Image: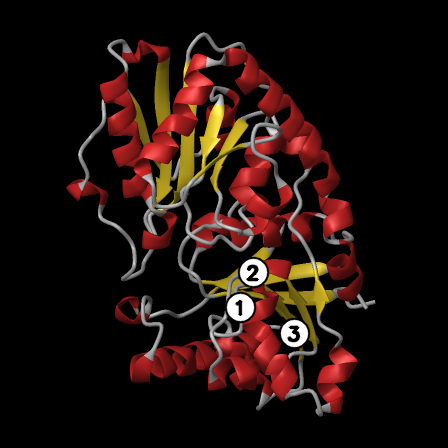
Amino acid sequence: MIKRVLIYDPVPFNGGSKTVMKTIVAELPSSIDVWVISNDEESWCNSNVHFVKLFSPHFLLNKTSGILYFIKHFIYLFSLISNMMKLKRFRKIIGFSGPCVDFSLYLLSELVHIEIIQLIQYDNGKSRVTDFALKRANQVFYLPSTYHSILPILKSQNNDNDIAKKNPMPFVNGFNNSTCKPQKCINQLGFLWAASLLKWKRVEFFINALAKLNNTYANTDKYFTNLCYIEPQSETYLNIDILDKVHNTHWYSKPKHLKEIHANSSVFISTSKDEAFGLSILESMAAGLAIVIPADRAYWDQHLTDGYDCVKYTPNNIESLTQALSRLVNDPSLLLKISQQAKLSAQQYCNLHCYSQILKCIPN
């Protein structure tokens, strides 16, 4: 059994993929010594891991293409080598963000014999970097909704015997039911939006719909909004200072008490564009919230039913989202029915079941 595993995390802010990795780590046998090398110590401070700092020049953090992207990953490579020289040897490294984000690992594999387990949780454009990485990964696990983005690469490598041996495996995200807090008795209906401020999460779309909803009701004391956000180190994030502040909205930056906010909310709204999975949606279902999602053919649109365990709206249509929220404000019985059924639907996503193949692969 592998006794020491290194997790590579070059993303400088928290997010769903990091939550997935921390959930997996929590289920590993205690005999496995888990180390994390990252530039985001805050996200790992409460995890049972040994933390090592990844050297990351600030001006390169948000570079995702061009010459500066490659310079960034060569700097990360030197940081990896430097730290691994100080520590005992690892036989396995886990990258959980995607081939392009974890590119430094594959540069390392050219210099050091080490097994790489790659989780793919976001779409990957066809590129030489992705092709380079997937040829060198020893085991690949992917969310089903990302398969179309890696299929052309796998097909192009179809004659490669190494790729055939790897047998890329799908997985879906899960949650630990013991971490869900029961909902409190709520007199007001509480909306919850929780995501990073990356532009594809579309917080401004939600704010505009909420403003329109407020214009519909003379008495907005029927509901309130909890808006939880993370400001990522990225060129593609939205500056919330330019947004109009909507009445009866509570803003929380990186809240430490997110489970408490869940327990005091009634409805979770997703405005993300073509989300590969949406762990925050699953967590909200498990917490007993009614779910509002776009009918965008993404994962949850394909697995939830409008009016049964969720409410759907037309993507990019503020009027449609406003109507969806109004349905729940005006019909408490519908809200209760949807939230109860969503909680039942969430039970099939037990983390031990969802991550079973990954948990088997890491120690072996």
Q: Which mark is residue 88?
A: 3
Q: Quadrant of the C terminus?
A: bottom right
Q: Nearer the viewer, mark 2 or mark 3?
A: 2
Q: Residue 310 at x, y = what percent?
A: 56, 32
Q: Residues within 10 Å of mark 2 (few under 14, many from 20)?
A: many
The residue located at (76%, 90%) in the rendering is 161
Q: In front: 75, or 165? A: 165
Kind of residue indicated by mark 1: Gly
Kind of residue indicated by mark 3: Lys
The residue located at (59%, 24%) in the rendering is 338
Q: Are marks 2 and 1 in contact (CB under 8 Å)?
A: yes
| Relative vertical location of residue 320 with respect to residue 15 in this rendering, above or below | above
Q: Earlier in the sequence, mark 2 or mark 3?
A: 3
Residue named by callout 1: 98
Q: In front: 40, or 150? A: 150
Q: Is residue 146 shown to the viewer in this render?
A: yes
Q: In front: 311, or 80? A: 311
Q: Is residue 134 shown to the viewer in this render?
A: no
Residue named by callout 2: 121
Q: Quadrant of the N terminus?
A: bottom right
Q: Secondary structure at mark 3?
A: loop
Kind of residue indicated by mark 2: Gln
| Relative vertical location of residue 357 with respect to residue 2 in this rendering, above or below | above
